[in-house]
Structures are given as C-alpha cells and as structure tokens.
Image (tube, rainbow, N blue to C red):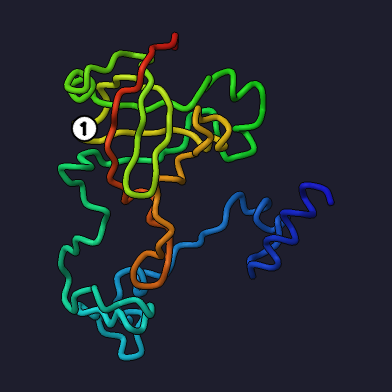
Amino acid sequence: MSEWEIISETLAKSGWPGPDEIYDQHWLDCAPSFESSHFLDGFAHADKKFHFKADWSKIGPDHQKLPALPDFVPIIDQATAEKPFRLVTAPARQFLNSTFSETPGSISREIRPTLLIHPDDAMHLTLADGDAVAVGNDRGEIWLHARPFNGLLKGVVVIEGIWPNAAFENGQGVNTLTSADAGLPNGGGVFHDTAVWVKKRGGTTPT
C-alpha cells in the first residue's frame, strides 16, 4: 500500500472523512461543541451528573484497597531504610524501543547501562563516575555503572534504556527489580513503583 492508501484506510476505519476532503479543507475540526466541552449537556454517566465519588468496583476487580472518596493511597513500593532509593526506569535518549537497543549505532551512543544518581547520594556512597555498582531489592540485583547527575532529586536513581539482560554485567536486566503485579484497580504496569538499594562494587571503568 502507498502512504496515501494507508492514510485513507486508517481514516475510513476510524470514521473520519477521507484524506482528499481533509487536504482540500486544509484541516479537520475535531473539537466537541461548546455545550459538550463545557458539560452543559451533562457528563458521561447515565444520569449525566458529575460523580465525585468513584465506584471502583465498576472500573476493575481489584478495588478493595482504594478509598470510596478521593484521597491519597500509599500503594507504591515504598522506600525503606533497607531500600532507600526510588528507581525510575526511563527510556534512553537513543532507544525508542527495544529494537534500537540492538542496533550498533544506538549502542555506540548509549555505550552501556548506567545508573544516574544525585551527586550528594553518590558522595554518601563514595561513588565516582564510572564506578561499578549493584542495584537491588527483594526481587534480585543487577550490575551496572554509576554516573552522578545533578538533574535528579536526592533519593531518586534512574536507569535509562531498554537494555537486554546480556548488556548487564551479571546477565540480569532491570526487570529483575520491577514488580509484575497488576496496578489497581484494573491492571496496568507498576514498573515505576520500585524501591531499591545501591551498593558499590569493586573496580572503576572508564565512561
């Protein structure tokens, strides 16, 4: 299929006008009406009312831990004295997805899995740029290298990328540390809710 045929079929299956019509008009106004955008005709419930109190049981089966009224719910993997750091598993700049973590160009720019850590936390752990570290929790541990980075909050560490397990020195990837539990109340990933410890390993390698 040509690019135009793909666009045409996608629009048709989505219930929108064809690309020729949109092209001739230069754009397509998809904004809802004034009444709808200001909820003058009600909200998206059978009674058209705004529901301040959510019925979590209608949204998902795992709702028992959620409060009836809007409130903060401490359901993340909380940091503790044994696991004082909050781990963020963010995408790397050069890795759009796991495909790019296998290309020589992307690998050469990212070099290797790295733990970004606030300089104050690095100083407390006597970590210098390039030091070998172990990061772990109750699920396991992974080996990589540290890089002090001032763009973080203290107590937060970041492992960028979608590296395969083989890229880590002990053959264990970052998913070793993250939970596979379903998010409340109806599933979803909880891989950003992770508490870890960080320990220095022997040796320093060039960055």
Q: Whole-percent x and y of residue 205? A: 43, 11
In the picture provided, is 35 more to the left or to the right than 3? Answer: left
Q: Relative to 204, does residue 6 appear above or below in the rendering?
A: below
Image check: 35 left or right of 180?
left
Image quadrant where residue 159 sits: top left
Q: Residue at the location (17% across, 71% down)?
A: 70
Could you say which quadrant of the image residue 83 lies in? Answer: top left
Q: Position of residue 162 (x, y in %)?
A: 52, 38
Residue type, label 1: Leu
Q: Nearer the viewer, residue 151 or 8?
A: 151
Determine the residue located farthest toward the front in the rendered image.
202
Identify the residue shown where x is 19% and y is 60%. 74
Name the residue tied to disc 1. Answer: 153
**What residue is rendered at 35% in x and 48% in y?**
192
Question: How far from the left and from the top, in percent, is residue 160?
Answer: 43, 33
Q: Secondary structure at mark 1?
A: loop
Question: Residue 180 appears in which quarter of the rendering?
Answer: bottom left
**Quarter occupied by the C terminus:** top left
Residue at image position (29%, 28%) is 199
